[in-house]
């Protein structure tokens, strides 16, 4: 039965890396602030956290190992229905399953049955979507002076993601025939996982490599 469910081993290597708060939040479909609350609640084990490369000073931005995504997904979807003790126990069980230290099967205790394999596979599918979205974005100095665009188009990822906040998806797709609904969803996912650095004040959010900030204009999208 467990072979019917996706696991971290089914993911491309590109996504099996330390992930930032915004990336994990995008994967599980919550806001950055919600993800920060999940981290502060202390339900996830300390072993899922790691320092970003090259940082060792106190207060350096923490990153999370890929295993954090299924844990956090369970925490925000099923965790609120459980006691804090059972919530922590199930998150620890997910860790054991993903490390191969426990069978990938539903957890049963008395009349309570928690389908951990489904929760894990749903989180893994979301991680796969982010990996695909990242692969569809390119930075090429020959295309719009290096603005990150959707592969095979001149459509800026952040521009189309921002446009989707004020216009319906169907309307956007009508305006841009080269854009599919899947590409649009992936553009929004990418922009959510890799938000532009704030212009004022300091930010601990990772900035995508070689990224330049442009003002949003519909004229640039054509």
Image (cartoon, helix red, strand yellow):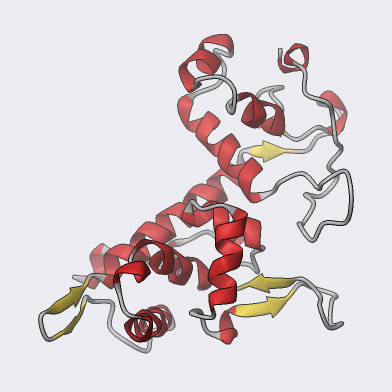
What percent of the width, then of the height, locates residue 192? Answer: 62, 45
What percent of the width, then of the height, locates residue 41? Answer: 53, 76
What percent of the width, then of the height, locates residue 58? Answer: 83, 83
What percent of the width, then of the height, locates residue 42? Answer: 54, 80
Query: The N terminus appears in which quarter of the rendering?
Result: bottom left
Q: Is 2 above or below relative to 211? A: below
Q: In screen coordinates, is 207 left or right of 162?
A: right
Q: Which image quarter: residue 3?
A: bottom left
Q: In screen coordinates, is 76 left or right of 53?
A: left
Residue at 36% over, 70% down: 79
Query: The C terminus appears in which quarter of the rendering?
Result: top right
Residue at the left extreme? 111
Q: Is 97 above or below relative to 80? A: below
Q: Nearer the viewer, residue 41 or 17?
A: 41
Q: How many marks?
A: 0
Viewer can see residue 6:
no
Residue at 38% over, 78% down: 94
Residue at 40% over, 79% down: 91
Q: In screen coordinates, is 61 left or right of 102?
A: right
Q: In screen coordinates, is 96 left or right of 196?
A: left
Residue at 63% over, 50% down: 193
Q: Which image quarter: residue 160?
A: top right
Viewer can see residue 47:
yes
Q: Is 161 above or below relative to 84? A: above
Residue at the bottom extreme? 101
């Amino acid at each position: 039965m467990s072979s019917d469910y996706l696991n971290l081993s089914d993911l491309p290597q590109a996504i099996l890396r330390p992930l930032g708060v915004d990336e994990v939040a995008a994967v599980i479909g919550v806001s950055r602030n919600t993800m920060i609350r999940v981290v502060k609640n202390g339900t996830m084990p300390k072993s899922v956290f790691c320092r970003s490369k090259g940082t060792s000073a106190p207060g350096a931005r923490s990153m999370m190992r890929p295993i954090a995504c299924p844990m956090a997904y369970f925490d925000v979807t099923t965790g609120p229905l459980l006691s804090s003790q059972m919530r922590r126990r199930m998150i620890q069980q997910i860790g054991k399953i993903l490390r191969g230290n426990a069978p990938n099967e539903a957890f049963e205790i008395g009349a309570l049955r928690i389908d951990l394999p489904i929760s894990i596979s749903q989180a893994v599918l979301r991680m796969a979507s982010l990996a695909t979205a990242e692969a569809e974005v390119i930075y090429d100095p020959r295309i719009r002076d290096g603005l990150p665009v959707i592969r095979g188009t001149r459509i800026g990822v952040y521009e189309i993601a921002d446009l989707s906040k004020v216009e319906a998806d169907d309307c956007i797709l009508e305006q841009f025939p080269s854009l599919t609904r899947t590409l649009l969803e992936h553009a929004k996912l990418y922009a959510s996982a890799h938000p532009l650095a704030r212009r004022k004040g300091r930010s601990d959010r990772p900035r995508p490599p070689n990224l330049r900030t442009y003002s949003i204009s519909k004229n640039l999208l054509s």
